[in-house]
Image (cartoon, grey):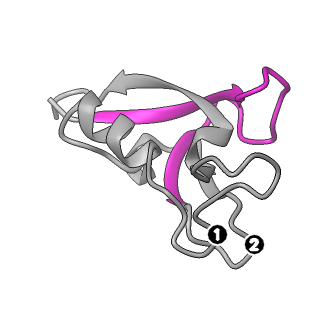
Amino acid sequence: MAVTAKVFCASDGSPTPHDGRYVSWWNPHTEAGVLECVTTDDLAEAKTWATITEVFAERRTVSKVQPTRPWDGLPNRPLMGIAVEIDNVPTR
């Protein structure tokens, strides 16, 4: 069964304009090294992964543009900037 990711909030708990919407596309490799995210209310347009493990592996992707965070030198993982909940995609 495939899974989707639905934005819950920013990783610090603050609300975002994407809350409650499915991720349809995201990019950790933007010029500024920050998250670029497109969301949708339509499940048919939602990005899907085969397993939960794949979602979380992708979320740990390090930016190719800015691989370390300038404030602490740790790996820059922009997709970790949002908290997501995982939903199973209903079988059609």
Q: Which residues are magenta?
A: 3-26
| Residue 8 colored in magenta in the image | yes
Question: Which circle marks residue 66 in the picture?
Answer: 1
Q: Does residue 59 sit above or below 78 in this rendering?
A: above
Of the 4 image quadrants, the one containing the N terminus is top left
**Mark 2 surroundings within 10 Å by alpha-carbon count, few (fewer than 14), some (14 through 19), many (20 or more):** few
Q: Is residue 72 left or right of residue 56?
A: right
Q: Secondary structure at mark 2?
A: loop
Q: Residue at x 78, y 25 (%)?
A: 12
Q: Nearer the viewer, residue 92 or 67?
A: 67
**Residue labelled with disc 2:** 32
Quarter of the image with the C terminus in it: top left
Mark toward the start of the polypeptide (2 vs 1)? 2
Answer above or below: position of 57 versus 32: above
Across and down, in percent, residue 43 comes to 43, 41
* Rendered view: 6 above or below 71: above
Q: Nearer the viewer, mark 2 or mark 1?
A: 1
Type of amino acid under label 2: Ala
Q: Could you tell me if the residues under marks 2 and 1 are in contact, i.e. CB atoms within 8 Å?
A: yes
Where does residue 77 sit, x and y in percent of width and height? 57, 50
Q: Residue at x 56, y 62 (%)?
A: 28
Q: Quadrant of residue 91?
A: top left
